Image (tube, rainbow, N blue to C red):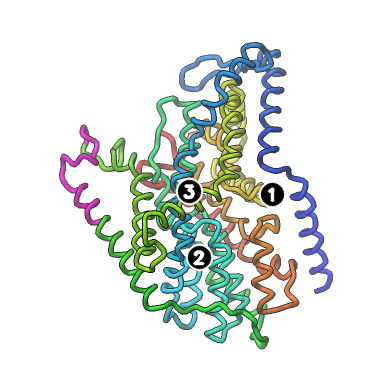
Amino acid sequence: MAEKSMKKNKFLAWIEVVGNKMPHPFLMFLEITAVVIIFSMIFGLMGTSAIHPSTGEEIFIKNLVSTDGLLLIMLNFVKNFQNFPVLGIVLILGISTGICDRSGFFTTAIKMGLKNVKGNGVVFVVALIGVLSNQAGDAAFILIPAIAGVIFYGLKRNPLAGVFLGYATVGGGFTTSLIPGGWDVTLTPISVTAAKTIDPSFDMSLLSGYFILFLAGIICALTATFVTVRVIEPMLGEYTGETSLNASSQVTPDEVKAVKKAGIAVLIFLVILVAACIPGNSFLRNQETGSLVFQAPLMSSLQFFIIVIFSLADIVYSVSIGKIKTINDLVKMMEESIKTLAPFIVLAVVVGQFLFLFDQSKLGQVLAIKGGNFLASLPIPTQVIAVLFLLLTALINLFIGSGTTKWLIMGPIFVPMLMQLNIHPAFTQVIYRLGDCGTNHLTPLFAYFAILLTTAQQYDKKAGMGTLFSAMLPYSGAFMLVYAILIVIWMTLGLPTGFGGSVWLY
């Protein structure tokens, strides 16, 4: 037992050492941009090219180390920041969800969801809420484990199991999509932009991967329930300690009324939206085909509808609970929310340059075409390649926590590359999102891992990093296994991935 523990600690130490050497994302993108410029010069001078699979055009890599390249950078610097694919939506959605967090709406709604749940049913409900809590953003990594620990403690179950379950399901379901939200809005534009390097006319809806990601969320909750009941609770045993935790799982009558009012407001909005979609000549339909999915204003306006739903729930709850009494209170909450996005705005300056120069150099297109041709020549099924991409994403996620940052790096390469294997960008994005889920909760490099340790020590002062790692490892292994199986089944059956999305490109 001591030998196994030592191996775990050595592995954990290795991850920490490697991860601590990773630069700040701003510096990392500066370095990647420099690499793009240098490689463009090397391969440009070599005359490296590739034949476009659709048009037959020969694409040459453009040397950016030239007067033309310098002018390209100078003339487009500000425009590259303004044209950053997800800048606008991240800012607006961040303000909306930030109000939810500051008003206490998310916290109250989650506590209400856990109320009166007994027995093993509480495990699944906690897991399901953990998956759903991706709508609350990173705050869920703090909120859900703390509340789940209190719930388990109140039911005389080991509260550490609740803490671990809460954290694992927030991570394991973080980019799934039981409810369409921020990840659909944030990642899809990056995927579309990457796909256009192969097919300039390509487009897909924000919900092109919704079917499989919805099922993945349910599977995540079921898997976490099984691991908790059959592995984690038996491993921890009966809890006999005492806790100094002062958190309460109770909600006040005023908070309950406020959540109900917010829910009614959202329901009314959804009823109006559905009613507007019903007529055959609805302005939300494609005016030529009558479709609500393909090239329809409804799908193109999902960003707007998601923001309206969040904002409506935020404002109604905050007004009801007394957090917003005047317009000044609302504006102040919005200003506080935007402050938390400052690091993203700074990062967007350099990422915008990287995306532009990577596209202009043609490195991405040539790499994708040649890489796709290489993968297609391998004597292995496409399903195996998809699973390898899943595992690669999970591995990279141990060291680069931000889902958007990773996709900004990987998307421009893997979306067009897998298009060469006839894999639809919607499915490539799904694989990426599931790989990202697999190790979110496992890496100690994630900022909230240290907070998890603090939460665990409120129930067991002897809990350490090894305790957390040994608890998270079974969840991570189980999630990766079921996600890999899900991907293989979906590919084998060729099922639709979502609204307008599919496994295969054609």
Residue that badge 3 annotates: 183
| Left or right position of 179 against 378 | left
Residue 168: mark in rendering: none
Answer above or below: position of 25 versus 125.
Answer: above
Residue type beneath disc 1 = Phe
Q: Which residues are magenta?
A: 270-289
The reply to whether residue 447 is visible in this rendering is yes
Q: Nearer the viewer, residue 342 or 412?
A: 342
Q: Nearer the viewer, residue 1 or 320?
A: 320
Give the x, y percent position of residue 437: 56, 55
Q: Mark 1 to mark 3: distance in Å?
A: 20 Å
Disc 1 and disc 3 in contact, CB within 8 angstroms = no
Other residues around mark 3 within 10 Å, as few (<14) / some (14–19) / many (≥20): many
Q: Earlier in the sequence, mark 2 or mark 1?
A: 2
Q: Earlier in the sequence, mark 1 or mark 3?
A: 3
Q: Mark 2 to mark 3: distance in Å?
A: 16 Å
Q: Quadrant of the N terminus?
A: bottom right
Residue that badge 1 annotates: 399
Determine the residue positioned at 49% across, 42% down.
Answer: 187
Residue type beneath disc 2 = Gly
Determine the residue positioned at 41% across, 50% down.
Answer: 210
Residue that badge 2 annotates: 130
Where disc 3 sits, the SS reads helix
**Magenta stretch: residue 57 in it?**
no
Where disc 1 sits, the SS reads loop
Q: Nearer the viewer, residue 256 or 86?
A: 256
Determine the residue positioned at 60% across, 48% down.
Answer: 402
| Left or right position of 417 against 19 | left
Give the x, y percent position of residue 364: 59, 27
Other residues around mark 1 within 10 Å, as few (<14) / some (14–19) / many (≥20): many
Disc 2 and disc 3 in contact, CB within 8 angstroms = no
The reply to whether residue 423 is visible in this rendering is no
